[in-house]
Amino acid sequence: MLTFVLKRLLQAVIVMLVVTLIAFLLFQFIGDPVTQMLGQEATEADRIALRQSLGLDEPLWKQYGTFVVNALHGEFGTSLRQGAPVAQLLAEKMPATLELAFFSAFVATLIGIPLGVFVALHKDSMIAKWLMGLSLLGISLPTFFIGILLILVFSVWLGWPSYGRGEIVAFGKWTTGLLTADGLKHIILPAATLAIFQIALVMRLVRSEMLETLRSDFIRFAHARGIPKSKIFYKHALKNTLLPVITITGLQLGGIIAFSIVTETVFQWPGMGLLFIQAVQFADIPVMAAYLCLISLIFVVINLIVDLLYFLVDPRLKAD
């Protein structure tokens, strides 16, 4: 177990070093931060002074080392668009993104797994066939189209709130809208937009794995021993089905956090995705680099957690 964790941590360090290198290269090849900060009319003396203060006159290897050290301390400089520390901007926007991502992932798992089990156990029923057809539609439709459609139906026609985060409460630097009625109303549509694809994916995955597990020899042996069907289905078969589901759900959670950009833009959700879109439009390199490093770190941490959860679900890995 310890060796496994150390190997994963070493892989995570290598991945993060590569990501920080890519983020560092953004500063070198996408725009000139000195020109963006001072403008075209600045004197050459002002440019030289700013380059020296930012350390841009140093060799590239030294600049990269400084960038990595600063990144380890959560420092990515100052936003060129807002003039505020990037770490402060991300800290302000992160609660909204994580709240939306975890809420939608929770809803998707809560609905997707039972639907997948139902469709697998009643695969020839009309309801199961309809659910499979709807799941195919949920996977095929683009996220932005789902969001616009939900806004049209529930916001324009029915008057549901679809803009912003609503009323929030603060616990120190952390904010949440899940504890207020207005905040819950505002999160329904963006969370549903993100969850529809996840529900369809989880449902189809659980169905596929469940059907394969039900054809296994140990399930036939359990039937032959006279074990109740409910215990076979929901204890033995479902437990063996959960291993790939954990993998996909974990990776999809990282994907929700990373690619909630479109949903946050459509619903003007004040999270990191909307901040990143605004940074791209303005070529705000510090924000773009920090977002890239943060999202990569989230993916690495989630992958490590998923790998560790394998040991809780599959006892064969413990034996190995």
Image (cartoon, rainbow, N blue to C red):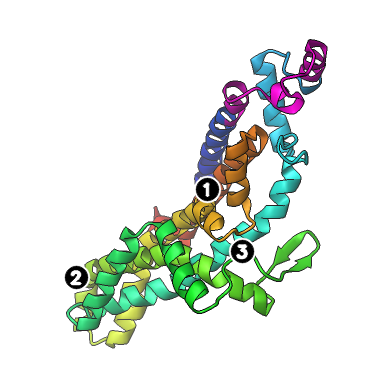
User: Residue 110's spot in the image, x, y percent?
Assistant: 46, 74
The answer to whether the residues at label 2 and label 3 have Cβ atoms under 8 Å apart is no
Residue 240 placement: quadrant: bottom left
Q: Name the one closer to the observer, 148 or 275.
A: 148
The relative height of residue 246 versus residue 228 in the rendered view (above or below) is: above
The relative height of residue 228 versus residue 116 in the rendered view (above or below) is: below
First reached walking from the N terminus: tag 2 or tag 1: 2
Q: Report the predominant secondary structure element of the magenta stretch.
A: helix
Q: Amino acid type of disc 2?
A: Arg
User: Residue 119's spot in the image, x, y percent?
Assistant: 27, 76
**Marks 2, 1: nearer the viewer:** 1
Residue at 41%, 63% (x, y): give it: 146
Please, what secondary structure does the residue beneath circle 2 have?
Answer: loop
Which residue was labeled with disc 3?
Answer: 99
Q: Name the one closer to the observer, 43 or 98.
A: 43
First reached walking from the N terminus: tag 3 or tag 1: 3
Which residue was labeled with disc 2?
Answer: 215
